[in-house]
């Protein structure tokens, strides 16, 4: 019961190749998403009495990927304004009906080094989303499927992957892709909850192993 952790890599290359000579060398590989429900980290603070660990559990997406290396020895190319867009699907209880809920979120990077190395990122869904839209008091046991896609500034697909949590039986990438095709369209009757898969800097993990992650682009209020 193992899902392949990549997203139509061959299609990525075709899409990227149509967007210029430079972009032909850009493709993120070995994309893996390890998703699980877990409580917020607990920090010890000297001037504040530590509370007990919360029973609330976030759905945490640990995202790993490799960037391509430079074309010259010791060369590092930087790619600006790369975004990770994440989506999950789960069965919700809304207005007395069972509906499929589509939750989305996005992380925008300032710049990512094309250094041929392994990179990592965290995105997280707050527990209140599941508390509000499921009747299951132990919501961390509900089945969830999801996908993550990397985009360049010009909206070329750089790579991505599928994942699932608490699914019984065999679930394939094709199965998950079919679900998103059904529930992510403009005429879908799914319950759409936008911008509620938080980027790392808006999650409880914002200060955890900070230097292990790529720099998130600051929001500029106009």
Image: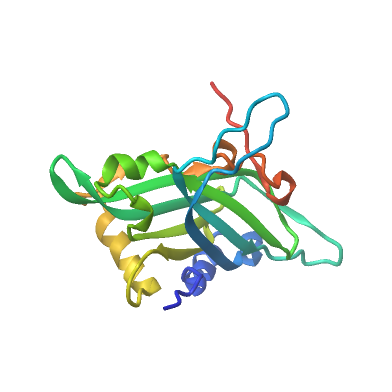
- Please provide percent x and percent y for residue 174: 35, 73
**At which x and y percent is residue 118?**
69, 63
In the rendered image, the residue lying farthest to the right is: 74
Residue 179 horizontal/vertical position (percent) = 29, 63
- Relative depth, front residue between 181 and 208: 208
Residue at the spot 33% in from the left edge and 55% down from the top edge: 89
Residue 154 visible in the snapshot: no
Instruction: Give above or below for 169 relative to 187.
Output: below
Q: In this view, does 148 lie above or below 32?
A: above
Identity of the residue drawn at 35% across and 73% down: 171
Q: Residue at x 21, y 46 (%)?
A: 93
Count all numbered tags in the image, as a single digit: 0
Q: Which residue is at the far top?
A: 222
User: Residue 67's x, y, as percent?
Assistant: 67, 62
For this view, does 179 lie left or right of residue 11? Answer: left
In the picture shown, does residue 210 fall above or below 170?
A: above
Quadrant housing residue 90: bottom left
For image coordinates 34% across by 51% down, the residue present is 139
Q: Is residue 126 left or right of residue 176?
A: right
Quarter of the picture holding the N terminus: bottom left
Residue 29 seen: yes
Residue 68 occupies which quadrant of the picture?
bottom right
Which quadrant would the C terminus be assigned to in this image?
Answer: top right
Comparing 4 with 135, the one in front is: 135
Question: Which colour assignment does the render follow?
Answer: rainbow
Q: In this view, does 202 lie to the left or right of 116?
A: left
């Amino acid at each position: 019961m193992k899902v392949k952790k990549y997203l139509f890599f061959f299609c990525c290359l075709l899409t990227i190749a149509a967007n210029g000579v430079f972009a032909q060398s850009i493709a993120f590989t070995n994309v893996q998403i390890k998703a699980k429900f877990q409580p917020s980290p607990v920090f010890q603070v000297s001037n504040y009495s530590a509370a007990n660990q919360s029973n609330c559990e976030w759905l945490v997406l640990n995202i790993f990927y490799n960037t391509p290396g430079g074309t010259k020895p010791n060369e590092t190319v930087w790619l600006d304004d790369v975004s990770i867009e994440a989506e999950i699907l789960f069965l919700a209880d809304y207005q007395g009906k069972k509906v499929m809920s589509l939750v989305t979120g996005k992380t925008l990077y300032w710049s990512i080094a094309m250094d041929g190395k392994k990179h990592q990122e965290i995105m997280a869904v707050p527990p209140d989303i599941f508390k509000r839209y499921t009747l299951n008091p132990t919501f961390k046991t509900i089945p969830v499927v999801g996908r993550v896609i990397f985009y360049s500034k010009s909206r070329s697909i750089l790579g991505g992957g599928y994942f699932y949590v608490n699914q019984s039986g065999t679930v394939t990438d094709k199965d998950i892709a079919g679900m998103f095709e059904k529930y992510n369209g403009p005429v879908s009757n799914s319950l759409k909850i936008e911008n509620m898969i938080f980027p790392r800097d808006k999650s409880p993990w914002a200060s955890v192993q900070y230097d292990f992650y790529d720099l998130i682009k600051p929001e500029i209020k106009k």
